[in-house]
Image (cartoon, grey):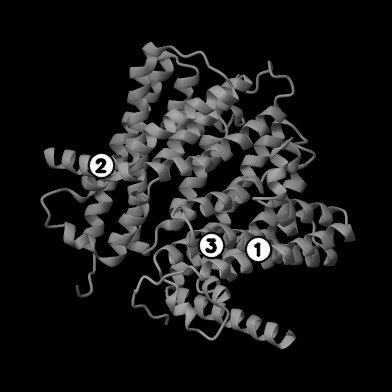
């Protein structure tokens, strides 16, 4: 466990050198939020009206939260590094190392996104206060929300790795990452599940959107203990299933690995 | 002059042909990239169907107009990255002193750099843009105008990316700045201009000229206006000239990274 902690610390220290890049990258997040602010301003004719049970302020805060999760967890390690390691055969060098490649990548990913998430969180909250103003938020709920956010990040990392594992079979898994990106963006970031047609809502609750973006964001804007319990149960189920799937895919993948020369 | 332009055009086409041949060495990956990019883009139709279920007119656009908007945006992006795919890498090439191999070629340096890479997925964007045009309603006039405008839009996008990418001759964060400008153009360009009010619209005519690349072409296709068409063409000539000027001015400050490399 200590070795993974050291990997985490080393990556974290390394990332601290790129704080200015992260802040500059925030500009594109700000642009997205600005666009949605304009869009929702247009859709809410009357600012006091509700769309799918959400007030205008809640809707914009929801988008700020989901975008924050999305932008701060986007990481090249889970996509490019793993794909390159598999394509180049470099993954073979990690097989005899005294650590698990999968846990190494997840730890490295967390080291990289931690600073990014903290900066994005601060900037996103400031953006929300400037554009919308404060929302009804009780600080007592914070520990529950932190757990849900943490699980959301872990599940997202595992799903990303599962997709990257496809490189064992099709060489380049990037197009599958695009589809995953779009599923999360279109179904999980722009709108809360309640905005979708009634027949789609139960289906969407079984998708990763529910545990990665919708769940955490919904708890921030409208916390309810029953929602928390439901979300955490679904997250644990997701965590177990995706972990098993990832382990199986990795084991099967490295068995069929072909390395030419070196 | 005309012969020179013809030679450059032939050179661009030849370079794209070799880029594509290189990418096609793995046919499965090549096709997956194209097909998945089409599917990836199609996901945004869902977004707009939901928006239009809330309100049937958004910023003066109905669903059909948004389809045309998306067709223009993807087509513009496609032309930029099929023909000038290395434009995104320009700041890094400059910062890392990697443009030596282009300097010794008996061709235009900037064009040689820009056409040195083709983004395969952009072919998916191009196919998707024409599928959307088909859904919007295709006619001979629409087809010609649309094709002209995606070429113009692609050139404008490349010119803007070149201008901001050339900042790398002077500052170190040029890649992030150029990336943000490209993302601004791409993000704003897929939403109706009618929802944006006030000072932000100045941005559309200056730093991120989406009005010339997307919005004005869209309105011209909907309702032909020769004056606006000439304005768009005039702007394109102006911005391309500025891009060349800034790049070559910056090139005088370029210092090699002494990196041994060869282009094959």
Would residue A105 appear left or right of A207 to someone viewing this image? left
**Pointer 1: what residue?**
B154
* Between B166 and A109, the one nearer to me in the picture: B166
Residue A205 shows in this picture: no
Work out whether A214 lies above or below B149: above
Q: Circle 1 marks a residue in which chain?
A: B
* Between B259 and B183, the one nearer to me in the picture: B259
From the viewer's perspective, is the residue at label 2 or at label 1 nearer?
2
Do callouts 3 and 1 point to residues on the same chain? yes
Q: CA distance from mark 2 to mark 3?
A: 31 Å
The local crowd at label 2, few if under 14, some if 14 to 19, many if 20 or more residues have their Cα within 10 Å, is few
From the viewer's perspective, is the residue at label 2 or at label 3 nearer?
3
Work out whether B96 lies above or below B188: below
Residue ID at (39%, 65%)? B96
Residue ID at (58%, 79%)? B108
Q: CA distance from mark 2 to mark 1?
A: 40 Å
**Pointer 3: what residue?**
B166
């Amino acid at each position: 466990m200590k070795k993974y902690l050291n990997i985490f610390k080393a990556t974290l220290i390394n990332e601290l050198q790129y704080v200015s890049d992260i802040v500059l990258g925030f500009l594109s997040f700000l642009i997205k939020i600005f666009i949605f602010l304009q869009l929702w301003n247009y859709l809410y004719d009357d600012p006091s009206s509700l769309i799918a049970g959400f007030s205008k302020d809640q809707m914009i805060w929801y988008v700020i939260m989901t975008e924050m999760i999305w932008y701060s967890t986007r990481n090249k390690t889970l996509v490019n590094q793993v794909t390159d390691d598999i394509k180049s055969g470099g993954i073979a060098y990690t097989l005899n190392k005294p650590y698990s490649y999968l846990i190494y990548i997840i730890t490295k990913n967390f080291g990289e996104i931690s600073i990014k998430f903290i900066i994005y969180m601060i900037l996103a909250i400031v953006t929300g206060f400037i554009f919308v103003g404060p929302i009804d938020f009780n600080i007592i709920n914070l520990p529950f929300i932190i757990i849900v956010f943490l699980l959301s990040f872990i599940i997202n990392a595992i799903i990303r790795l599962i997709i990257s594992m496809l490189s064992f079979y099709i060489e380049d898994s990037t197009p599958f990452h695009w589809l995953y990106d779009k599923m999360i963006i279109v179904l999980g970031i722009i709108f809360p599940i309640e905005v979708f047609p009634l027949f789609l809502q139960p289906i969407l609750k079984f998708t990763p959107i529910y545990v990665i973006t919708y769940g955490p964001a919904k708890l921030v804007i409208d916390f309810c203990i029953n929602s928390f319990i439901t979300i955490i149960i679904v997250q644990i189920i997701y965590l177990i299933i995706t972990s098993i799937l990832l382990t199986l895919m990795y084991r099967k993948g490295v068995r069929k690995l072909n390395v030419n020369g070196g | 002059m005309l012969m020179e332009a013809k030679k450059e055009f032939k050179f661009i086409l030849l370079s794209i042909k070799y880029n594509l041949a290189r990418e096609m060495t793995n046919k499965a990956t090549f096709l997956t990239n194209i097909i998945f990019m089409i599917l990836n883009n199609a996901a945004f139709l869902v977004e707009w169907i939901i928006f239009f279920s809330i309100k049937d007119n958004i910023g003066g656009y109905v669903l059909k107009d948004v389809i045309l908007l998306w067709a223009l945006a993807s087509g513009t992006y496609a032309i930029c990255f099929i023909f000038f795919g290395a434009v995104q890498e320009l700041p890094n090439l400059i910062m890392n002193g990697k443009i030596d191999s282009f300097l010794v070629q008996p061709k235009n340096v900037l064009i040689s750099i820009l056409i040195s890479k083709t983004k395969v997925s952009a072919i998916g964007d191009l196919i998707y843009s024409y599928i959307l045009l088909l859904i919007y309603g295709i006619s001979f006039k629409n087809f010609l105008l649309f094709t002209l405008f995606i070429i113009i839009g692609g050139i404008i996008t490349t010119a803007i990316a070149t201008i901001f990418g050339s900042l790398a001759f002077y500052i170190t964060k040029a890649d992030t700045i150029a990336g943000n400008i490209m993302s601004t153009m791409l993000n704003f360009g897929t939403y109706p201009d009618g929802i944006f009010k006030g000072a932000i619209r100045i941005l559309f005519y200056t730093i991120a000229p989406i009005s010339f690349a997307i919005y004005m072409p869209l309105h011209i296709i909907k309702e032909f206006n020769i004056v606006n068409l000439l304005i768009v063409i005039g702007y394109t000539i102006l911005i391309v000239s500025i891009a060349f000027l800034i790049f070559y001015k910056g090139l005088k400050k370029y210092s090699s990274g002494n990196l041994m490399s060869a282009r094959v």
